[in-house]
Image (cartoon, helix red, strand yellow):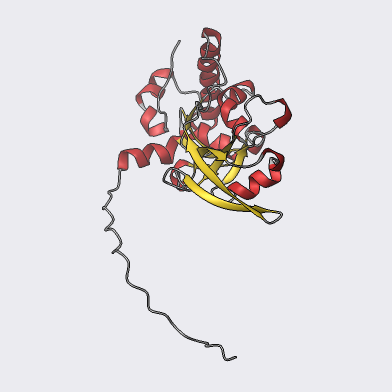
Amino acid sequence: MLRPINTTQAYPLGPPLPIPVTLHHEPATHSWLRKISLVGEAASLDHLGHLPKLLLAKGETCVEVKFIGGLMVLMLFDHSVAAKEFMVSEHRWKDYLKWVRWGDKVETHEERVAWVRIMGLPLHLWGQRNFRIITEGFGKTIAPYEDIPHRVDLSHVKIGLLTTRRTRINDEIHAAFEGKVYKLGIIEFDEDWFPFRFDPPEDGKEKWMKTIGCQRRMTKGKRGRYGRKPLKWVLKNRKKLGFRRVTLT
């Protein structure tokens, strides 16, 4: 039988692509991202949940941590010297972060955390390998559904994903096992989750530790470049020196 080769098939044209809106440069935001902020990716979801406390326990008292989506965090420092010292000193962050870069050098918000339910999978097929096969088309598993024998609710599977999808996940897929095909629902839901919620708010002692630690590190970090300048001089020239703020007690 002859088989046609090198043939083309004409398809009807789809709807025209939407015209993108035009964005503008934001100099104020770019300035503080470039000078006093770093972006890093947490090693895991658990590290993300405890990151402020983990950094504080290691003596990092001059950093303010903010969640910016996915496993990524924005770290704000009191001045540019402290930010650079932290970035180049890998031993200060490698236990909790995969990488650290200047805030204006990273394309953020490319990934997000999504919580999904797997509906319709027979219980005898529950396991990490099958869960991964079912969800790999939607994202990377960062919160697996484990310890199945000790769970009370076995009506569905709940998994945390790191995904690049911008829209809510609500799909059906077909999965086969021993000749039988199952229709499965992959449904995103709102999980009561937020990074840093695992740790209680700072108490008075921790705030005091941060204030004292920042002052000591500021003095030590600046001494090599500016010598022992009086405090009034530092306050007057704080913008030129790269300080975001100076805390006094």
Residue furthest front in the image: 180
Q: Give me the residue at 42% from left, 21% from top.
A: 246
Counting from the top left corner in percent of width and height, residue 174 is at: 57, 53
Left or right of 155? Residue 19 is left
61 to 242, vertically: above or below: above
Q: Give me the residue at 52% from left, 24% from top.
A: 62
Left or right of 203? Residue 123 is right
149 to 199, vertically: above or below: below
* Residue 30 appearing in the image: yes
Left or right of 240? Residue 224 is right
Q: Give me the residue at 29% from left, 64% from top.
A: 15
Question: Can you tell which quarter of the image residue 234 is in?
Answer: top left
Between 164 and 25, the one lying in front of the other is 164
Question: Can you tell which quarter of the image residue 42 is in?
Answer: top right
Counting from the top left corner in percent of width and height, residue 229 is at: 46, 23
Q: Give me the residue at 30% from left, 62% from top.
A: 17
Between 164 and 11, the one lying in front of the other is 11
Counting from the top left corner in percent of width and height, residue 53 is at: 59, 22
Q: How many marks?
A: 0
Quarter the C terminus occupies: top left
155 to 14, vertically: above or below: above
* Residue 147 appearing in the image: no
Residue furthest bottom in the image: 2
Counting from the top left corner in percent of width and height, residue 29 is at: 34, 38
Residue furthest top in the image: 204
Quarter the N terminus occupies: bottom right
